[in-house]
Image: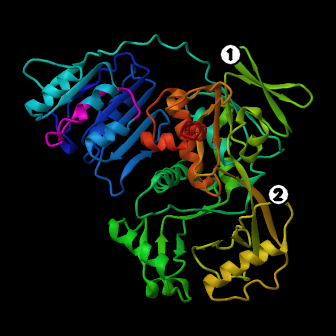
Amino acid sequence: MARSASAKSGADAVNWQPAWGGRTHFVIFDAAYGDGAAFQQTLHAWRNDPRRPARLHYIALANEALPGFRRIPQVEDAVTLDLLTAPLDSALEQLSARLDAIWLRGAADAGTRFAHALGKLAEPGALLDADGLPHAQMATLARAGFAWEPGVQRAVFASRRPQAAPAPPRARHAIVIGAGLAGAAACERLCARGWKVTLIERHAQPAREASGNLAGITMPLLSKDDNLMTRLSRAAFLYAQAYWDRIGGNDIDSARCGVLQLARDPAHADVQRAIAASRAWPADFAEWLEAPAAGELLGAPAPDGAWLFRQGGWVRPASACGAMLTACGDALVRRFGAGKVTLEQRGAGWCAIDVAGEVLAQAPVVVLANGTGAADMPLAAGLPLSPVRGQVTHLAQGAAPALPFVLCREAYLTPAVGGWHSLGASYDDDADPALRQDSQDENLAKIGAMLGDLALGRAAPLQGRVGFRCVAPDRMPLAGALPDPDAASRIERLRDVPRHAGVYGLLGYASRGLTWAPLAAELLAAQLNGEPLPLEADLVAALDPARFLLRERRRGEVG
């Protein structure tokens, strides 16, 4: 696709000339999103062209209030919009995509460093259309492989890279193991791209393990250094909010009622004030409240202040799983009540086999999304995943304050859901599946301390639920191709790590499945479909299941 040389950003963006070039996936990079008018015109052209590519990916620099990459779900599953809030060179260096069209507007002051990154991302024959570039930028782009047309700021990328032979196409059919949040999201994101998926669950119903709690909470994280966990949490939270709205409508039992997170003590409050001062956070994303305002909202003393996350809230995970599976339609085959399943490689594919020896499904791709159950599968051997017991306490409505928001600090308290407040959850290092009084007492004590009511729930019966979170040592999720430790020898980078052919994981969501599941599934689906990735390259690397093996080998070499 090209545009006229006189077209500008925003409301002046006109005369877009579709030239899809017969591609099935068409990827555009726009250096100036502006008010989105260019995106809307491109979307209009795509919708009305019978020769359009099957998928349209629009990636643009934008002056969003929050930094980083943000994928925004669209009405059509075949359209992807990514907004990148970062300097041009940094954004391109973190971008994982192959670009078919490049629009450089407003880039005259961006220096020349971006040209090398752009040359690495451009597809052979990609069209670059620019306005107002100085000679130094044009010359640097020419050295990066862009051949300029005489008299206009338009160029074609003439790749100097050796072209690898195209890989043979792989059937778009996957087996997903596990029907909790991770597995249901994987099914929905793959089916939305036209994949056929067979979902295998050992229980008779979805969301029977860690995703079976009455209510879970959703909220972002903040940190002074805006670390990897914080950046992932922000991107995932924003994506999940839009995703749940789009996928669930009224079918998801939830409330975006806000989350009030109390500071733990004066020292912790000082850190939070520094975070609040470090950036002008949009109030609907995160607002720091000093003690008077926090206490007034809580209706009890909050001497150290609190964060208010207005867009946070609670979701019943089973309802979210149900909405995602319903959205899959006929592309999804459900095999529930399968019991224990083994995976066996046959030819270029994988077979899922039950204890009776029956083949439940066969496909070239397998996604392990079964939480702690993955530890029992040889293909996940070596992944340092731990089951962590979590007991949630249920208090009958009226036995706890009727707060209109979720309250949290060391534990959380939800508004009544189905007549029950959820409190917890404990973090226990044992495998006891039964409800225990000591865990209930611990939950009640934490919530009572936050509310200034140390007698909260003392006479309450032992009610609640026990689940086991799947937790990695760095507390980050795992999303991507699983490593093959037996085939690994000397490895220096993630791309050197041998992988099990066609085997992927969505694991280690700990207590953040409602926040992480949609974006992690989107990431994996984009990887499998050969599409631009929705996260910065360093965040993708931070989620790579092979990261632990790489660290282990590096430590061994140092030792």
For the C terminus, which image quadrant? Answer: top right
Nearer to the camera, 433 or 19: 433
Relative placement, left or right, of 247 versus 80 is right
Nearer to the camera, 45 or 489: 489
**Amino acid type of the residue tagged 1 in the rendering:** Ala
- Residue at label 2? 431
Measured as percent of width and height from the top left, residue 543 is found at 54, 43
**Amino acid type of the residue tagged 2 in the rendering:** Ala
The residues colored magenta run 96-115
Measured as percent of width and height from the top left, residue 198 is found at 72, 31
Q: Is residue 123 visible?
A: yes
- Residue at label 1? 348
Using the image, determine if residue 297 lies above or below residue 311: below
For the N terminus, which image quadrant? Answer: top left
Relative placement, left or right, of 78 versus 60 is right
Rendering quarter of residue 439:
bottom right
Rendering quarter of residue 171:
top right
